[in-house]
Image: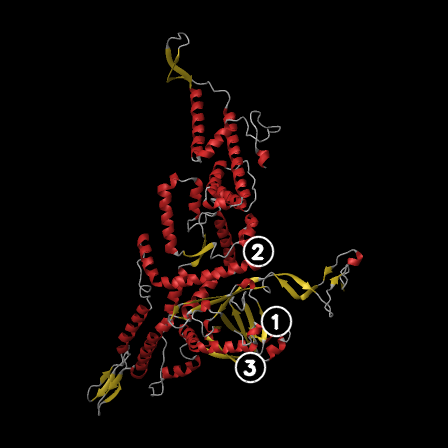
Amino acid sequence: MPKNRMSQKHSIEDLNSLYRDAETVDQEIFAEQRSNLLLVSGEHYNRRMSSFYRRIREAKDLSNEQKLRLTKNHIQRICKIYSNNIISANPGVGFSPKNEKEVHDQKVSKLHHAVWRDAVEKYSIDELIDDWADNYVQIGETIVKLFWDASAGKIKGYEQKLNKQGQPLFLDPNGQETTDDGSMMGMQFQPAPDQSRPVHEGEFVFEEVFGFNCLRPPEAKDIRKAPWLCVRKMIDREELIARFRDIPGIEKLAQSSQDETFLVFDSGKGGYSHAKDQVLLREFYFRPCTLYPNGYFYFSTKEGIVAEGELPGGVFPIIFRGFDRVQTTPRGRAVVKTLRPYQAEINRAASKMAEHQITLGDDKLLIQNGTKVSAGVSLPGVRTVNYTGMEPKILQGRDGSQYLNYMTTQIAEMYQVAMVQEETAELPAQLDPYVMLFRSARQKKQFQRYIKGFERFLIDLVKTYLKLAKIHLPDDAVIYAIGTNEAVNIAEFRSSSDLCYEVKVEAQSDDIETKLGKQIVINHALQYVGTQLKPEDIGKLMRQMPYANFDQSFDDLTLDYDNVTNDVLALDRGETPPVHPYDPHPYFIKRLTARMRQADFKFLPPQVQMNYQQKVALHEKMEAFNQLQIQRAKQGYIPTGGYLVVCDLYMPDPKNPNKTQRARLPYESLVWLIKQLEAQGSGLAELQTMNSGVLAEISQHATQSSPPGLPAPQGGGMSNGASPWSAVA
């Protein structure tokens, strides 16, 4: 709470006090996170001492003050194994409706999925995931600040130019700037563009925040629920002035830090470096609370507040997830913390081995007093030595192998503690698919906790993005994401309720083993029940195959499904979609009646329920009319060609009515009859799959000469029946 509670806002003194307390409480953890990056990058010791160590390696002996330190960087490899296992699981998000049978939820889920997939391609989310996974493993925390930057993206125009008095300027027909807008002359002059103030399309920014640059209040037990978070960053003074040039006194706020020198951590340089002409910008973000119902943000330096305001839509922009958590602290801990003592012992053993090689590495010749050694006769390829006295002895050099077993044991224990010993084992060249799936499931179990944690981070990120997208994305950007066919459903996207209540966001791990298992299941389904499935059902299965993109190849099989889904959504919104004469009416009737039998249908407005009934009735009339026209089209002369065929059918003898004889019919007549029966049988089989009540209504319509309530066809129509096309156009 601010010191002056009546002001309902924080002053610069309050913000400076919050910053000091937050910086102190996690100071040791920040130092550990920075050292983690040095360990991973192999910069255990300052690189400026490399020439000193090179002289030690070349020296013949070492004094007690001189130490040789070598780095065997196993931590980097283990961290890469963790990151690769998280990334190879292909963490992402999949959208599914909260109520699987609700068509509205299905469409909302599909729209949100399309908007997010557009962001994945536009902002290269797959590449950003690699960086986020490295921070998750190496630093112990992955943090992203997500916000809409109106000054980014392509330039779509310029703001109107103003004169020194602040009046807007216009361009007359001669291209001269004037304050007259042309209304007095009955004209409309174009605004004069200000080339120094461009207007951009805007785009989202996924800003990476390192753990030691994210501060939390000391009383926070969980950073994800902390009342506020602070992000600190170094920014050039000129850039700060240009970004907030409309803020009064911005030069003074930036000037206050101009002469200060900051100590900035840089893992690439192996430590800290000094930065001048930069300003430390502190960004405070307060979650929605009693003091700030819609949330609040402050951008400040040490001397004053640069900018402040409510959070757009009340959405908190910082997404946080820790790798491991130690009780009593809300900060995340990296796997490097566990590996640090093993790496130190490995480096010490390697350094001792190198030290022994330098001091005792060469072989030595031992001779007694009185023994003389001299060069012998030189022969091709032979080196001879002459000696007098006792025979010399050769003392072999030491390579430090006495430390090798200890170092090897430490390395094996290090990989065992890190739970990656199986990852380093060699695999056979070929594996049975089921054996590979079983082995993958067993190995994935070791990293399941961390994979699940990273997926939860992505879920929170996607939820935040979609909430902000409803606020900031213009309609043309939404149409580009969901497609022009779904442009009528923009209102569904913007007016949908919170994802936590309407649409579930689920994590998915489609790695190679998961995709292989899905492909095997689909293959078995098509193999054993494929002949019993309808074409549209086979098309849906083809869409789910992970190793091929069949969306366009099988669009024709799922076209009717998509059309009925759009009609149901339109009916639920109170619209009345038209009935097309070429619609598959039995399929439309089945889907619409299924919607009418759902439990929530009775809660729809009466007018919406009536629209459903009218649309079903129109489809029934159209189907009955089509069946009647097909039947009438097939009526005509029966072919009588071909030889006579004797049938097992007894008819009265025309010569003697008291007797009967076997019927003899032309061959072409029988073939025609069989074809008619087959055509009629296929039509009956399709009708038998429909609801019995609907079938009775269609039969009633079919018995009439023309559908009731529909006009007779105009010129060119059939004389024996009426066409309902004009009634549903």
Compared to residue 621, the image places residue 179 above or below, namely: below
- The answer to which of marks 1 and 3 sits earlier in the sequence is 1
Cα–Cα span, label 1 and label 3: 21 Å
In the rendering, which numbered label is found on residue 260? Answer: 3
Q: Is residue 346 visible?
A: yes
In the rendering, which numbered label is found on residue 244? Answer: 1
Name the foreground residue: 683 vs 356: 683
At x 50%, y 61%, the residue is 464
At x 37%, y 12%, the residue is 661
Cα–Cα span, label 2 and label 1: 27 Å
Q: Secondary structure at mark 1?
A: loop
- The answer to which of marks 2 and 1 sits earlier in the sequence is 1
Compared to residue 502, the image places residue 192 above or below, namely: below
Q: Is residue 555 visible?
A: no
Q: Which residue is mark 2?
A: 477
Which residue is situated farthest in the bottom direction here? 370
The amino acid at mark 2 is Ala
Name the foreground residue: 607 vs 651: 607
User: Are there few (<14), some (14-19), or many (20+) residues within 10 Å of tag 1?
Assistant: some
In the rendering, which numbered label is found on residue 434? Answer: none
Image quadrant for the C terminus? top right
Drawn side of residue 22 relative to residue 59, left or right: right
Residue 425 rendering spot, x and y as whole percentages: 31, 63
Residue 38 rendering spot, x and y as whole percentages: 42, 75
- Mark 1 or 3, closer to the camera: 1
Name the foreground residue: 105 vs 198: 105
Cα–Cα span, label 3 and label 2: 44 Å
Which residue is situated farthest in the top direction here? 656
